[in-house]
Amino acid sequence: MKKDGFRVGLIVPSSNTTMETEIPKMLNSRLGPEKFTFHSSRMRMKQVTKEELKKMDDDSVRCALELSDAECDVLAYACLVAVMSQGNKHHFSCETRLSNATEDNNFPTPVLSSAGALIEGLKVLDAKKVSLVTPYMKPLTKTVIDYIESFGVEVIDSISLEVADNLEVGRLNPKNLIELSKQLNIKGADVLILSACVQMPSQPVIQKVQDQLGIPVITAASATVYQILKNLNLNTTVPDAGELLSGKY
C-alpha cells in the first residue's frame, strides 16, 4: 500500500456519473484501517446502444495505459453491458487485454471488469436462479440475460426500464428499486440482481431490499467492490451492502 493508500483505477464511460460515487462510498464505509484514492479514465459514450458500446470498448486499452501511468494498485473496467454486448465470456479476453497493456507499460496491474465481477459474485453466492433489474432497452437486457445464462445461471424474471440516455440512467432514483423489486417474480430465485448496470444507482437501498425480500441482493457495483477487495487481499466486509459484502465470502 502506498503512503496515500490503495490507488483504485476506474475505467468508465464518459457519461458515467455513478461509479465514482458508489464505489468510493462502499470502500470508504469499511471499518478497516485501509485508505483508498480513486483515479478515472474515460471512454466516450452517451447513448447505450450496441454501436456506441463497441466503439467505447475498443478505447479501453488507452484508459488502462493512462491509469497504469498513475501506478494504480487495481483497475476496474466499470461498464457491464459494454463487455457483455461483445459476446458471451468476453470479459475473460477483455481483462487479459487490459492487463497485458499495463504489463507492456512496465507496471503490471490486476484488472477486473464489472461484467466478470457480477458473474464471479453469482458463483460465490452459488446462485442457480436469479431475477434482475436493468435500465437497458429490452434487446440489451436480453444480451445480459444470455451472457449470465451462458454460465449456467437461469434468469427467471427481469425488468427493463428502457432508458437509452446514459446520463438519464445515472439520474434514476435508487429508491424506486424498492417498489420495482416487489414487482419481480423471485419465487425460486437464489439471488436478486438489483442493478445489472454500474450506472444505475442502487447503493443506498441494497440492504433494505435484501432485508425486505429475504434473499441475497447483489448489484454490478457491489460485485465490483467485492472483486476490488479480493484483488487487494483485503477483508470483504462492507456495511449495508448486501450478502456478497457481508464478510462471509
Image (cartoon, rainbow, N blue to C red):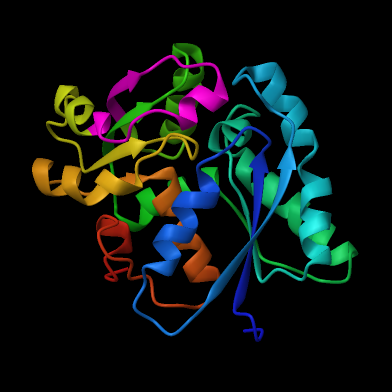
Question: Which residue is painted at 37% across and 17% down in the image?
Answer: 161
**Residue 175, position in %: x, y?**
25, 35
Q: Quadrant of the N terminus?
A: bottom right
Among the 4 quarters of the image, the one containing residue 182: top left
Question: Which residue is painted at 32% across and 35% down in the image?
Answer: 174
Q: Quadrant of the C terminus?
A: bottom left
- The segment highlighted magenta reads 155-177
Question: Which residue is painted at 26% across and 37% down in the image?
Answer: 129
Q: Can you say whether 239 is above or below 85 in the image?
A: below
Q: Can you say whether 22 is above or below 67 in the image?
A: above
Among the 4 quarters of the image, the one containing residue 28: bottom left
Asked if the magenta segment contains residue 134, the reply would be no
Residue 15 visible to the viewer: yes
Question: Which residue is painted at 26% across and 55% down in the image?
Answer: 242
Q: Is residue 136 left or right of residue 105?
A: left
**Residue 57, position in %: x, y?**
72, 35
Pick the front one: 150 or 72: 72
